């Protein structure tokens, strides 16, 4: 993860599996994070996605668009 960045990561069974995208961005501006990966899974595995800011950006409001074209 970059300092002062926004990231999207995927966790498998509580352990980070991949960081899908990382972007240095100015807080308050629109930007997009994206990525893809193949995750081999077994019955009972859990998959979680996290979008978060690091460094100075972590104190800024992070608003996620819920439009189907964006998620």
Image (spheres, helix red, strand yellow):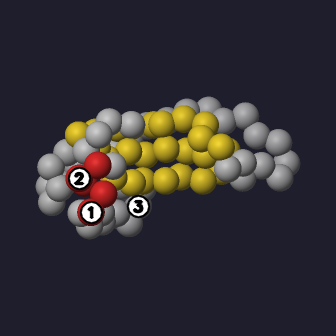
Query: Mark 3 or 1 closer to N-term?
Result: 1
User: Is residue 4 placed above or below 58 in the rendered structure?
Assistant: above
Tag 3: Cα neighbours inside 10 Å, few (<14), some, or many (≥20)?
few
Could you say which is closer to the camera, residue 4 or residue 22? 4
Image quadrant where one finds the N terminus: top left
Closer to the camera: disc 2 or disc 3?
A: 2
- Residue 32: image x %, image y %? 28, 47
Which image quarter holds the C terminus? Answer: bottom left
Residue 4: x and y, percent? 25, 44
What residue did someone put label 1 on? 59
Q: Using a 10 Å C-alpha cutoff, classify the residue at mark 1 as few (fewer than 14 neighbours), some (14 to 19) or many (20 or more).
A: few
Residue at 39%, 54% (x, y): give it.
52
Q: Which mark is residue 56?
A: 2
Q: Residue at x 15, y 49 (%)?
A: 26
Q: Is there a contact, CB below 8 Å, between mark 3 and mark 1?
A: no
Q: Which secondary structure, mark 1?
A: helix
Q: Position of residue 69 (x, y in %)?
A: 36, 56
Q: Earlier in the sequence, mark 2 or mark 3?
A: 2
Q: Secondary structure at mark 3?
A: loop
Q: Can the viewer see residue 32 in this picture?
A: no
Who is closer to the viewer here, 54 or 18? 54
The residue depicted at 34 percent of the width and 63 percent of the height is: 64
Tell me the residue that label 3 is attached to.
68
Residue nearest the viewer, comparing 14 with 40: 14
- Label 2 sits on a secondary structure element that is helix
Q: CA distance from mark 2 to mark 3?
A: 30 Å
Q: Are marks 1 and 2 in contact (CB under 8 Å)?
A: yes
Q: Quadrant of residue 17?
A: top right
Look at the image and tell me whether residue 1 can be seen.
Answer: yes
Query: Which of label 3 and label 1 is nearer to you?
Result: 1
**Mark 3 and mark 1: span between their CA atoms?**
27 Å
Residue 60: image location, x then y, percent: 24, 63
């Amino acid at each position: 993860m970059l300092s002062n960045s926004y990231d999207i990561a995927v966790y498998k069974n509580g352990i980070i599996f991949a960081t899908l995208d990382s972007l240095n961005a100015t807080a308050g501006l629109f930007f997009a994070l994206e990525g893809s990966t193949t995750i081999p899974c077994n019955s009972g595995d859990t998959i979680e996605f996290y979008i978060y800011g690091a460094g100075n950006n972590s104190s800024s409001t992070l608003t996620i668009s819920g439009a189907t074209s964006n998620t």
